[in-house]
Amino acid sequence: MNKKAFASIAGICFILIMATVFILNLVLPDKTFSAEENRILQGLPHFSLSQYFEGRYETKLENYANDQFMLRNGFIKLKSSTDITEGKLEANGVYRCRDNYLMEEIKKPNSQYVNNSLSSLRQFKRDYPTLKMYFLLAPNAANILSDKLPATVRVNNQNTYMDSFFSNINDYGYKVIDVRKTFTAHKNNTQLYYRTDHHWTTDGAFVAYKKACKVMNIKETIKYDSYAVKNDFRGTLFSKSGFSNGMDDAIKIYLPRSGSSYKNSVIYYSDTKKKTTRFYQLNNLDKKDAYTVFGGSNHPMYTIETPTKSSQNLLVVKDSYANSFIPFLAQHYRKIVVVDPRYFYDDINNIIKSNNISQVLFLYNSNTFFQDDSLEMMLSN
Amino acid sequence: MLFSSIIFLYYFLPVVLAAYFIVPKKHMKARNIILLIASLIFYSWGEPVYVFLMIYSAFFNYFMALEIYKEKRKGGSGKRNMLFTLIVNLFILCFFKYFGFLMDTINGILGTNLHYTALALPIGISFYTFQALSYILDVYHDRTKPQMSLLKFTMYLSLFPQLIAGPIVKYRDVADQLEDRTITLEKFGDGVVRFIFGLGKKVLLANNLGALHAAILALPDSQVSIVTYWIGMIAYTLQIYFDFSGYSDMAIGLGKMFGFEFMENFNYPYISKTITEFWRRWHISLSTWFREYLYIPLGGNRVTVPRHLLNLMIVWSLTGLWHGASWNFVVWGLYYGVLLILEKYVYGAYLEKVPEWAQHVYAMLIVMIGWVFFSSTNLTVALHYIGVLFGAGAFPLANMQTLYLLRTNFILLALSAVISTPEPLAQFKLLCKNMKIPGIIIIFVILILSTAYLIYSSYNPFLYFRF
């Protein structure tokens, strides 16, 4: 009797659950966009016989069922927490580390891309022997903070990749800005990287800036104070892994101390044709990707003009690590032209000539740079 | 369509169940039609072309069985029609499943370079062809009457719960159920519980074990260690059991929800003490099929010893080949053929005298090494893997990667190993007898977790990582 009663209860519960879920899935409105995943969700596909026989309709309908499932984000959190309970340390290439850090794995360099970048860098220096060229290749969190990695995790040794790259470009005539030593020295008293994002923090960028000043022969003139403008930042690594590490980050901005000889800059974004005097776009703080507070989203090119004493004009070739770094440089150059080779398709030689460029700074983080082929495409045009 | 998908679980299944039960029980024909339509949609989902092949197979076998039956009623033997039907069925199976394998083998042996276009394998063709063969042979041997209704026969062959991964349901076992099925709430609930357990085995255990196994196979040589490869082999051993038996559980559970009773397909194979016992517990519907329709007609063991050995080797090489069109499956089958012969003729009697734990170790070692052949892409890979397991190639005993894998998968492996024994289910049944609520909670927690894992598989964060 008992067993029968149990089965009956299970059967009734199943019918109730299935019916409820089915009706809710039908009734609840479809979403078009997932902020968590930063992508368009699949809408209800239109039926056509040809699509059905090609199997495309079925694929779309399955995606639709998944994307629009009720409490989708809740289920994804449930899966992640189950994984954590089970002892999982990695998801989508992101490790769960000590002190609530999430860190991206160190990827093996794409040797073809790196070789192409190297040879185009060599040629570029040969084409412009009089320009001073600097290269700041930032290490990633899993390199500098490797002591925070879980005990059994061994990531690839980024230092060997960086050493070999540095020694090559040093031979070509580039001045290397190697921030690893100063980062290691600062890592215990400064939070250099976000816990939930793959970027360095503004503090980290500032430490790197001080190192760059030494190599680039710049005199630090301005005193800054830092202000936290957001205390609940959760970045790309949080989204990518789905790990909720229970620790929000602060985003800081650096503002000049009053009374210092700070000169305001004018920034001109050539893609949106907008002019502004603000490096920090504070209204982006409420967006999903709050890192865009640093100069907005990806701009192929923008110029910064500052009424400085210096008459030097700088070209910055960069990835997103530069976004929080560039404001510090503005005080030392009359004009800075910033290009992001991944979105920039114009002729770099024209830019150098027409802006009377006298120095070039390359600024990348290692993980991105060693997987990137756009620099070569831009330089060899 | 897959059972372990959101679209099946939360759209297809509720709609089919609702349609089925809205029709009053007395209209069995309407219910059968609903099941047939559902099965055809299920089968054609994502790759509709081969549904016509299956329908053809149903029509052909339906008419040929009637033909054989008619001939026998007239006093003939029906042998020629029976042979013709067998050949056509086997030809279709071979053409779609083994053509590429055959051409590769010919090219390999003769050194020729014959070109061919590899065909996509029609899903479930090995299963429904074997069901059709059992039907034809049973009709021929008067073990069952032919099905007069084309609808019922087509429904039998295409029935979606067992269509794509078994169990191989013999026609004569379900003949009565095609006519009439009783469904009670208890039976339905039993089916639900069975289905959810199967779903959990597949989604929560097998899929994660599979990811572990794949990760270990993908390790570069510099990170390989002996213990890591042992973990990989154990992971695959558990994966294939939970994958396959989970699927069978889901099939049996779904069958029950619609009033069918399918045969059991697995009976805790990993508690076996001998290989003979293992094959009585593993994929029972397949081994009984081979026994009944090949081994016994060949003479079984009531023949001379050399002939018996030959029979065993034929049966086991074909059992291997049934699992896949590649030489490692043949080797895997022959491996078991040889071991079964050894157990029967050489050391079986001694084996009974060693301590029980040693018998378990013996059986599991053989089964696990068998899975290496089964899971490898080719024989070279398999032999290399087995070599590493036993210390060939100067790989370290263990390394940091081994620790990492243990640290991150220990709970999964331990839980899986425990669940592969009968004890947890026995405990669960005991629990349900005394307290129903915890039992119900366990079942629906499994359902909710499985749903979470299925939904996560579509979690696809698109990030401006290049920014």
Image: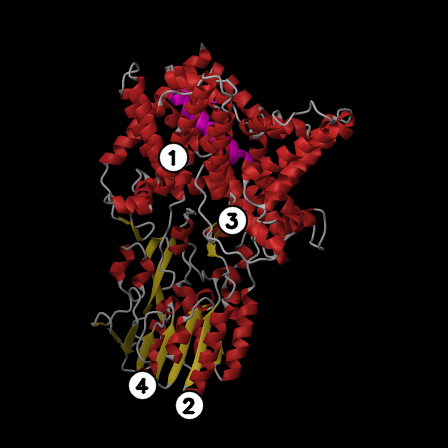
Res B383 visible: yes
Q: Nearer the viewer, mark 2 or mark 1?
A: 1
Left or right of A69, for residue B71: right
Left or right of A2, for residue B348: right
Q: Chain of mark 2?
A: A
User: Label 4: few (<14), some or many (≥20) within 10 Å?
Assistant: few
Note whether B200 is above or below A234 in the view shown: above
The residue indicated by pointer 1 is B56
The residue indicated by pointer 2 is A130
How much space separates mark 2 and mark 1, taking CA atoms?
79 Å
Quarter of the rendering containing residue B345 = top right
- The residue type indicated by label 4 comes to Lys
How much space separates mark 2 and mark 3, taking CA atoms?
64 Å
The residue indicated by pointer 3 is B100
Q: Position of residue B372 (x, y in %)?
A: 62, 43
Q: Position of residue B124 (x, y in %)?
A: 45, 36
- The residue type indicated by label 1 comes to Tyr
Q: Secondary structure at mark 4?
A: loop
Q: Which residues are magenta?
A: B241-262
Q: Position of residue A100 (x, y in %)?
A: 46, 50
The reply to the same-chain question for discs 2 and 1 is no
User: Label 1: few (<14), some or many (≥20) within 10 Å?
Assistant: few
User: Label 2: few (<14), some or many (≥20) within 10 Å?
Assistant: few
